[in-house]
Image: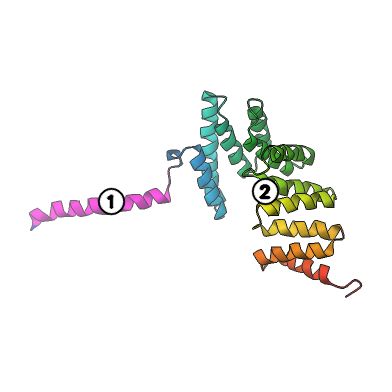
Amino acid sequence: MNACRGPVSRLFFVLILAAALPLAAQQAPDVSRYDALQNYRAGRDLEGRNRMEEADRYYNEAVRICREEIARNAGNMDSYTVLTWALQRQRKYADVITWGERALRIAGDMRITETMGEAYFYLDNHTESLRFMQRYVNALPQGDRASVAYFFIGEIYRLSGRWRHADVAYTTAVRLEPGAALWWYRLGTVRESAGEGSFAVEAYERALALNPNYREASEALLRVRRPAGGA
């Protein structure tokens, strides 16, 4: 009996250890096994689950890989693209501009153009943001980021009080991507500001259809529907 116990115990231990390895790997993932784009996408997934500290590990790895790739090949536009995307998610907008300008001196990549527009917006440089966003939609009116670009154009016009220009931009954004409650709400606000109450109602209703708990849209709808002079 004692002679059998040793080999059986060792076999049992090996099986337990093998079963535990995948769990350990899940608890401490090795970001280096991914390429830059995979790291970026993993970061976006974690960020979407409000796990920003973990997401940053993947974004940092994506940045590291991209910078190494660019050092080996300064014309690698895919590396510049993922690099600026990752920096953007980390809100390192000045770095986005620095690397984006460097990339655009090599080639006019529209992916980077749109990212630059967003970075300038968050840096409160609306003139440059508008210039980059308009360049993107002029080149790719049906591009992957066209709806987002039009939304930012609407934001810029709204913040400068150009209600009708903002209306056109937001309307284009929701036509391209009708599922964003915020965009419909913004469209309602500029229509309301322009004195177009009935059209504002339509936009606010669409926002509430997408998000019934949207308090600002609900309050705006009540406000617009309230008779003039009413309490």
Q: How many marks?
A: 2
Q: Mark 2 highlights which residue? A: 147
Q: Quadrant of the C terminus?
A: bottom right
Q: Is residue 50 above or below residue 31?
A: below
The rendered magenta stretch, by its main secondary structure, is classed as helix
**Residue range of the region highlighted in magenta in the rendering:** 2-30
Q: Residues within 10 Å of mark 1 (few under 14, many from 20)?
A: few
> Quick one: SS at disc 1?
helix
Name which residue lies at 83% across and 51% down: 164
Q: Is residue 109 left or right of residue 161?
A: left
| 129 falls in the magenta region | no
Q: CA distance from mark 1 to mark 2?
A: 50 Å
Residue 226 screen position, x and y as percent: 84, 72
Which residue carries the number 1 mark? 17
Q: Quadrant of residue 89?
A: top right
Q: Residue at x 69, y 38 (%)?
A: 136
Q: Quadrant of residue 179?
A: bottom right
Q: Look at label 1 and name its amino acid.
A: Leu
